[in-house]
Image (cartoon, helix red, strand yellow):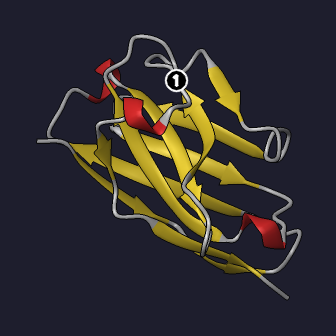
Amino acid sequence: QVQLVESGGGMVQPGGSLRLSCAASGHTFSNDVMGWFRQAPGKEREFVAVISRTGTMTYYTDSVRDRFTISRDNAKKTLYLQMNSLKPEDTAVYYCASSPRVIPTTTPADFGSWGQGTQVTVSS
């Protein structure tokens, strides 16, 4: 059974940085495409970033490109999201998710396992 546990969320001022981590267990981490999603109050869950199984391919939603960086350490079974130049509109609960797909996907329905989420609040 796949288990994903996010950490690293918190409150930060606009322009600040945070690094989210997602520790995986219960499956072969390197076999899965991994992604980050977020959900703000009153809004639907949205795609943020995705990374291929080997880490050589990444894709971002337009609003975070050039500010966020997704990465993974397959030896440590850990996924990361480095978030820089944070804006108030980045405030949301952030979720990591795993997908058995061979190539990266941005569709939430393609991800079969999800973490419990970590809150990120950007406010002055």
**Residue that lies at the very extreme toward the bottom in this rendered image:** 124
Would residue 96 be found to the left or right of residue 115 on screen? right
Would residue 73 be found to the left or right of residue 115 on screen? right
Q: Please tell me which residue lies in front, 31 or 100.
A: 100
Identify the residue at horizontal 57%, vertical 57% (top origin). 38
Q: Please tell me which residue lies in front, 13 or 60.
A: 60
Looking at the rendering, which quadrant does residue 90 occupy?
bottom right
Q: How many marks?
A: 1
Identify the residue at horizontal 67%, vertical 50% (top origin). 82
Q: Secondary structure at mark 1?
A: loop
The quarter of the picture where the N terminus appears is top left
Identify the residue at horizontal 61%, vertical 58% (top origin). 19
- Mark 1: which amino acid? Thr
Would residue 6 be found to the left or right of residue 69 on screen? left
- 71 above or below 124? above
Identify the residue at horizontal 34%, vertical 55% (top origin). 115
Would residue 80 be found to the left or right of residue 114 on screen? right
- 61 above or below 29? below
**Residue that lies at the very extreme toward the left in this rendered image:** 1
Q: Position of residue 6 (x, y in %)?
A: 41, 60
- 56 above or below 109? above
Circle 1 residue: 105
Q: Position of residue 51 (x, y in %)?
A: 54, 27
